[in-house]
Amino acid sequence: MNSTEPFNSSQFGLQVFIVVIIPLVVLILPCMVCCCICCYGCKGKSSNDKDRMKRIHYNKKWDDKKKIFMDELSKSKTIIPVLNNTNHDDLIVTIDSPSKKIACYYEINQKTNLDDIIECVNTVLVQEPLPDEVVIRVDSPGGSVSEFGYIYQELTRITGAGIRLVVCADMIAASGGYLISCPANHITAGPFAIIGSIGVICQYPNLHELSKKIGAKYDTFTAGTHKRLYDMFNENNPENIDHLKEELKEIHDQFKNTIKKHRPNVDLDKIGNGDHWLGAKALELKLIDEICTSSQYLMKLSNTHNICEISYKPKTIYDNYLESLISYCMNFSFRKLHQFIL
């Protein structure tokens, strides 16, 4: 006697779902997401790279401010008596004069991306004709030796191309901030700006005694005598400490020699001790050339130059992690596909 089991539609649907739908979702969905990200990313990235750099005509900006000011002045009767004796010609900024020289302006501070500084230098050097002057506003207390040494070397490309470089330190140009100011042909600073700090510092916590108290042990394995000169969890070898101090001295000597190269009139014994000074004292020590803020200098420069400000919009999280996200989706999709086939 032949008997057949009744057809179970729900069980069949579950099998189809497990065998067909789930693999399709696991394999195809990440690929689709990845493709969408790639398409949108390429489109967004191309426009982002194009639009991230901004150029502002400083002369025009001041002329617009003057126009707005004069328009408001004509509307307000209460301000007119105060400005009766004002020479309005001082507010006039001539723009787009073909006879004027060309100058570029850029800012370097703690938020500035290293790649953007390099792109700024490249932007300046590919201009035809080259600008006559580059003005950089530096606002930095310093940082990594390697990073600021790199910025210093990049800025020397400007002076190496025969372009006059001016650095304006409105608030602070200390340590690495002063190092990147050295290549300038002319350095200005605000009267209360902090200038100098020509020294090198290296500091680590020492938790050796605390580790002994709590019974913690931290092992370090190295190959090479000087691979790890300082260990924050273990007792340090005096020879390694001496070697570390020698490295700091070597960096310090190179720092001072770099300053002497660009500013031969400074007294290294006075300025190379790690101390810092306000702008007025820095002028006496020949660390700067003029007490003047960046706005003052640019306003004066606009009489003889057409000034173009170069700036870059900060990169978004999307810009920074787009490539990683695409790579992850692609790897995930191919890995699942490989597992499904095998």
Image (cartoon, helix red, strand yellow):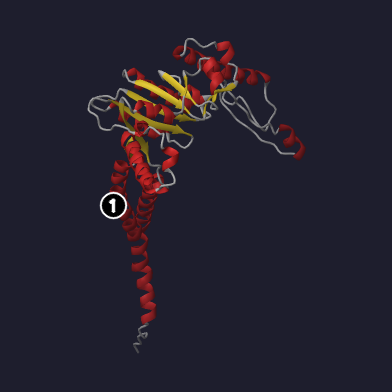
Residue 183 visible, this angle: no
* Residue 319 drawn at (x, y percent): 38, 46
Decide if residue 24 is on the left or right side of residue 247.
Answer: left
Q: Which amino acid does label 1 sit on?
A: Cys
Mark 1 secondary-structure assignment = helix
Q: Residue at (36%, 45%) from the top-left corner?
A: 74
* Residue 180 drawn at (x, y percent): 45, 24
Residue 216 visible, this angle: yes
* Residue 60 drawn at (x, y percent): 31, 37
* Residue 7 drawn at (x, y percent): 35, 84
Q: Which residue lies under the disc numbered 1?
A: 39
Q: Residue at (70%, 27%) from the top-left corner?
A: 235
The quarter in which the C terminus is drawn is bottom left
- Viewer-proximal residue among 121 and 202: 121
Q: In which quarter of the image is residue 250?
A: top right
Q: Residue at (69%, 36%) from the top-left corner?
A: 217
Seen in the picture, residue 140 relative to 290 is either above or below; the reply is: below
Q: How crowded is mark 1: few (under 14 residues within 10 Å), some or many (20 or more)?
A: few
- Viewer-proximal residue among 323 and 196: 196
Q: Quadrant of residue 301?
A: top left
Decide if residue 196 is on the left or right side of residue 84.
Answer: right
The quarter in which the N terminus is drawn is bottom left
Residue that extends furthest to the right in the rendered view of this protein: 213
Seen in the picture, residue 266 relative to 33 is either above or below; the reply is: above
- Viewer-proximal residue among 218 and 121: 121
- Viewer-proximal residue among 38 and 146: 146
| Count of numbered labels shown in the rendering | 1
Residue that extends furthest to the bottom in the rendered view of this protein: 1
